[in-house]
Image (tube, helix red, strand yellow):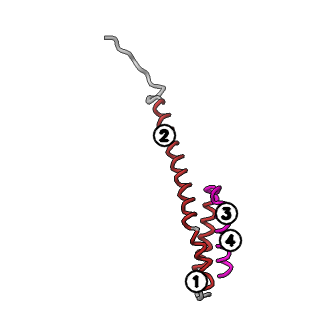
Amino acid sequence: MDKLINELDALTMRFVDRMDQATYEEVEEFVENREKLVLSIQQKWSAGENPDVEPYKNKVARILSYDSAITAVIHRLKQEAEQHLGKTAQAKMQRTAYEPHFTPDAYMFDQKK
């Protein structure tokens, strides 16, 4: 349990140190690794391997204190992606306005009155 919590702490600290420059790939990798560590800790805890939680309280509290900052980074990246998708959709809509709406193989006949 000590090893897993120390790994989680180290992972969190590495991410927090560079979260302002983090790309979405780095955030995704961090979240996946964090999830694996948390699941491993939960499995060990439910197996009853280490019932005393007192030695871990401070370290876990410190790890959890960064959750709001990590969530803010994820939210920022989500907004950037939404903006990019919106710009792409708008450009597509503007481009289709100038494209012909008929097939080029069609024939048109003018009638004289």
* Picture residue at 61% right of the left edge, 56% below the top: 24
* Quarter of the view holding residue 52: bottom right
- Provide the residue span drawn in magenta: 1-26
| Inter-mark Cα distance, 4 to 3 | 11 Å
Q: Give the residue type that dot 4 points to.
A: Ala
Is disc 4 surrounded by few (<14), some (14 to 19) or many (20+) residues within 10 Å?
A: few
Left or right of 105, for residue 29? right
Specify which label sits upstream in the sequence, 4 or 1.
Answer: 4
91 part of magenta stretch: no
**In-front residue for pair 112/6:** 6
Left or right of 18, for residue 74? left
Q: Do the residues labelled 3 and 2 touch (CB within 8 Å)?
A: no
**In-front residue for pair 53/87:** 53
Q: Mark 1 points at which residue?
A: 45
Residue 62 placement (x, y as % from top left): 60, 74
Q: Mark 2 points at which residue?
A: 90
The mark closer to the camera, 3 or 2, is 3
Q: Residue 99 carries which label?
A: none
Residue 25 placement (x, y as % from top left): 63, 57
Element assignment for label 4: helix
| Inter-mark Cα distance, 1 to 3 | 29 Å
**In-front residue for pair 103/94:** 94
Q: Name the residue under label 3.
A: 17
Q: Give the residue type that dot 1 points to.
A: Trp
Q: Give the residue type that dot 2 points to.
A: Gln
